Amino acid sequence: MAVKVAVIAGATGAAAKRLKEALLADADWRIVGLSRNPPKSVDPRLTFLAADLTNAESTRAALAKVPEATHLFYTARAQFSDASKGVEDVEGNAAMMRNLLEGAEASAKSLEHVHLVEGTKWYGMHLGRMSSPAREDDPRHMPPNFYYAQEDLLRAHQKGKKWTWSASRPGFLYDFAPERARNLPPTIGAWAAMCREMGTRLDFPGKPQNYTALFEATDASQLGRAVAWMATAKAARNEAFNVTDGTVFRWERLWPRIAKFYGLEVGQVRPLNLGLWMSDKAPVWEAIAKRHGLVSSRMDDVVTWNFGDFLWGLETDVVSSTTKIRLAGFHDTVDTEDQILRQLAQYREAKVLP
């Protein structure tokens, strides 16, 4: 019988998908997922409840159905309109976090731990040059930053309580996730497919500084394993940790491997505004989808181009130190280049990308 009951807020989102897998790999866990439109589950240890985190009453009512909850995982995110800018809604994200904490404190009398998924935007990577490698105790940049508001809420609510907290700060989160268009692999794959369809080489559509800068990313399964570890590790109590694959890469090194995967020649560095440049290319994608028998003929179902503008528009290194989490006891490592190529192959096999 499960002895730990996890409530995952935002249970159908990007960070939660692999977290559920990591927790269910341990027979001691039972999971209750909160989401606006809860899916059906065939796993008896995984159930879903309807909850609108933007609504305090809805959140409180859902949590009241799980009074036995021992662990709370916040993986949700308020929507924002322009992924190319990277700046997100502070008050909206803070309100959702507040609703969850207040609802849990009202009903979960056996609560042991609360985990908050943050990100590298904590260090201002979306604002320009960030300290690199970023360390968890680096000074904050001038607000607004919704991660600051959320963690401050978490720390304030935990004072004087028996439960503890932790926070993870992943880099660019990537995964085989056909349901998510704002994602690294389909951005790469859709761009390569367009280049091949239109008879061009595989140009790099970002800035020259981006092509040569040093980057890190975080495979979603790596994040899931790390968060599951933080939930119970004594060394993780009331601490924040950077979580990345543990390897670094440069696009100038990875790009030729991507070109080879798609049977293309490497082109030149040619900065483009993809959100604008691809706005009239829907018919091209429809032709690609028809020829290759893809699951969707709508380009917008597969890729969010202005996410590519943000990703490839950064001009400095984006690297986070993982010394703290390794010294604390989490040592998993992923080869980012190999994993991206594996996921591109998964997208091809699933007929999402050609």
Image (cartoon, helix red, strand yellow):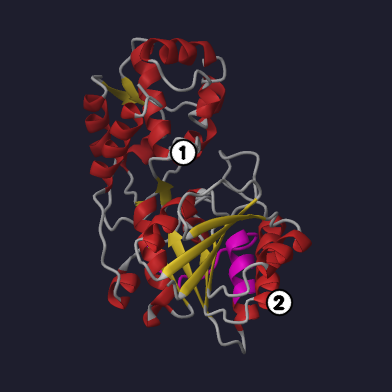
Work out whether 12 lies above or below 182.
below
Q: Secondary structure at mark 2?
A: helix
Query: Is 2 one of the magenta-colored residues?
Result: no
Q: Secondary structure at mark 1?
A: loop
The residue drawn where x is 51% and y is 37% is 307
For label 2, count other residues whose C-alpha is less than 10 Å away and answer few (under 14), some (14-19) or many (20+).
Answer: few
Marker count (numbered): 2
- The quadrant of the rendering that contains the C terminus is top left
Label disc, if present, on residue 179 of the rendered structure: none
Q: Disc 1 designates what residue?
A: 313
Q: Disc 2 designates what residue?
A: 106
- Would you identify the image quadrant in which residue 43 lies? bottom left
Q: Is residue 270 left or right of residue 303?
A: left
Which of 114 and 46 lies nearest the eye of the viewer? 46
Q: Is residue 146 left or right of residue 265?
A: right
* Mark 1 residue type: Gly
Front disc: 2 or 1:
2
Q: Position of residue 59 (x, y in %)?
A: 71, 62
- The quadrant of the rendering that contains the N terminus is bottom left
Work out whether 199 lies above or below 304.
above
Q: Position of residue 152 (x, y in %)?
A: 62, 73
Residues shaded magenta: 133-154
- Name, please, the residue furthest toward the bottom: 160
The residue drawn where x is 57% and y is 46% is 39
The residue drawn where x is 60% and y is 81% is 158
